[in-house]
Image: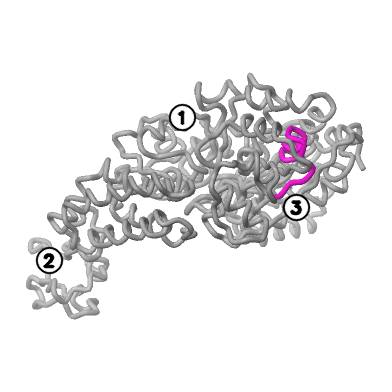
Amino acid sequence: MKTISDIIEIKNITKNNISLGGRQKTRVVVGMATCGIAAGAQSILTAINDELKKAKLLDTVTVTQTGCIGICQYEPIVEIYDNDGRRTTYVNMTADKAKRISSEHIKDGKIVSEYTIGAANGENVTSLNDTEFMKKQKRVALRNCGIIDPEKIDEYIAMDGYQALHKVISGMEPAELIQFILDSGLRGRGGAGFPTGLKWRFAAASVSDKKYVCCNADEGDPGAFMDRSILEGDPHAVIEAMAIAGYAIGADEGYIYVRAEYPTAISRLTIAIEQAKSYGLLGKGILGTDFNFDITLRLGAGAFVCGEETALLTSIEGKRGEPRLRPPFPAVKGLFGKPTILNNVETYANITPIIVNGVEWFKSMGTEKSKGTKVFALGGKITNTGLVEIPMGTTLREVVEEIGGGIPEGKKFKAAQTGGPSGGCIPASLIDTPIEYDTLVAIGSMMGSGGLIVMDEDNCMVDIARFFLDFTVDESCGKCTPCRIGTRRLLEILDKIIEGNGELKDIDKLQELCNYISRASLCGLGQTAPNPVLSTIRYFNDEYIAHITEKRCPSGVCKNLLRYIIIEDKCTGCSACARVCPADAISGEIRKKYVIDPAKCIKCGACMEKCRFGAIIKR
């Protein structure tokens, strides 16, 4: 059992070796989130330790793991913090490269410039902090990710960890705390952006002998990995915030519902919970007070619908994960029929910095109606992929062109999908839209949990709508007819259009069905399922019309509408295309024009890949 004096002493001792300046030892951190581990980071960590052991430098150097550093395409990543505060980011590491930086940089203090991030992305920098990728970011929820070792509670404490919990339980009344969170303007980071403090107030006002605090870590959107990265890089941030929420509403028990496909997150959460218990920061009599709070993990089986709050609570209870009718809302009747608050990982990750730094500090970031920052998983057709945290109100253009580095290969930006299967596509004409809750809803999209998928001119927007709808159909729990049957009918019409059998009246049918589904579905997932269809019809209606009237996919994606054509002026008669065609669909004579028989062509694209003269095109 630790007292607050013990916590402060741990903070002061440990912080010297983590802070950017005044460090007693050189600090070497290896990115060991899921992306880093998959790229081979474990062998790099081993190689650095082995080299430093041989050089007898382990007494003067700290080598440790960390969570997600952020810029995923450069994994594995190693960062070195020298005693003078210099931070060097090495990317695309291998065991051999790790041995070299151990010898030249760690031992002799000489930066190996050709391995740095600047050498990889063409910038004259050696630190991630100085890149265009980072300059416009403001890290609040991700404040410790990529810096601390997530499996060492002392390092979390060194970064002001558990100071907020002590401040709250020793000096704030629950109603005062709730008002504090309400005044900050923090809105839920997992969906429609409901005010967090208001949700807590409703639960606090409910009279019951038992209440619960739950965390939604069931991140299921395609391309989303924000919550996973926070859990892997800073698990105590969620644990501390849940304890604070428990104090606010009068709960003594919490559940973290995390998908079983996140083994690294589960492992680090398990370690963090046990560490917090051993320090007396979870359990009975926290920090010598009469406040009790404990946390249990529940593993989800990967059902997308369990991201909906009532379905998640039903799953924790051991039942089939299906939504419930509301009202009553969880704040009145939630887990096991008791008042419950449920926030997602990123929402909780914002709680402690608000309490430590104050309401005005948090409100200084963002916009009038959307305070603070938002974490996005940036992916798709973009130069810089990874995890980014930006102030609310940052424009889509700034994210795509500056933080994201633009579209590769000189392609044109076409659209961005936000909010996953529940969101919509934002066209290039709206690239200057500020990213905040209300503006995204106004243009037919939504914030959602924070997936941001960038698309270029080669993406077919009808196919994109079909992709997300196919996901929704598979993941529908089937409880309500509008979602179970309606989304399947939408998918059938999209398939019909993509296969070249569409009619103009199908566009009207799609819109009519979308209206019924959004108005009549039981839960928010069904209600928002039509968004990808509606937004693509709204902004890319010409592509639907081309598919239907011209039997043509403008982007050359939809296979049934493709035609491969040999351009006579460019064809040299080399016969390479004919030799590679698996369907014998190409005929001609050497040194004369070859032709493709569309009736035989299976549209595999092998001929186009083989042609060295650019004589074959898709139409």
Residue 246: image location, x then y, percent: 75, 38
In terms of image quadrants, where is residue 416?
top left
Q: Which residue occupies the foreground of this view, 41 or 598?
A: 598
In terms of image quadrants, where is residue 240?
top right
Is 583 rendered above or below residue 309? below
Find numbered disc 1 in the image and state the secondary structure of the residue it sits on.
loop
The numbered mark, 1 or 2, whose residue comes first in the sequence reads 1
Residue at point 18% right, 52% down?
A: 505
Q: Along the horizontal axis of the image, is 138 left or right of 161? A: left
Residue 311 marker: none
Residue 449: image location, x then y, percent: 52, 43
Q: Does the stretch in magenta take in 410?
A: no
* Stretch of the chain drawn in magenta: 241-255
Residue at point 53% right, 35% down?
A: 193
Residue 308: image location, x then y, percent: 54, 49
Q: Along the horizontal axis of the image, is 588 left or right of 63? A: left
Label 3, on which residue? Answer: 296
Label 2, on which residue? Answer: 571
Is 347 rendered above or below residue 476? above
Residue at the far top in the pictured view: 360
Q: Does the stretch in magenta take in 243?
A: yes
Separation of disc 1 and disc 2 at Cα?
Answer: 49 Å
**Neighbourhood count class around disc 1 (C-alpha, 10 Å): few under 14, some 14–19, many 20 upward:** many
Separation of disc 2 and disc 3 at Cα?
Answer: 67 Å
Q: Along the horizontal axis of the image, is 249 left or right of 59? A: left
Q: In front: mark 2 or mark 3?
A: 3
In terms of image quadrants, where is residue 541?
top left
Label 1, on which residue? Answer: 394
The number of numbered badges drawn on the structure is 3
Residue at point 72% right, 38% down?
A: 241
Residue 551: image location, x then y, percent: 15, 59
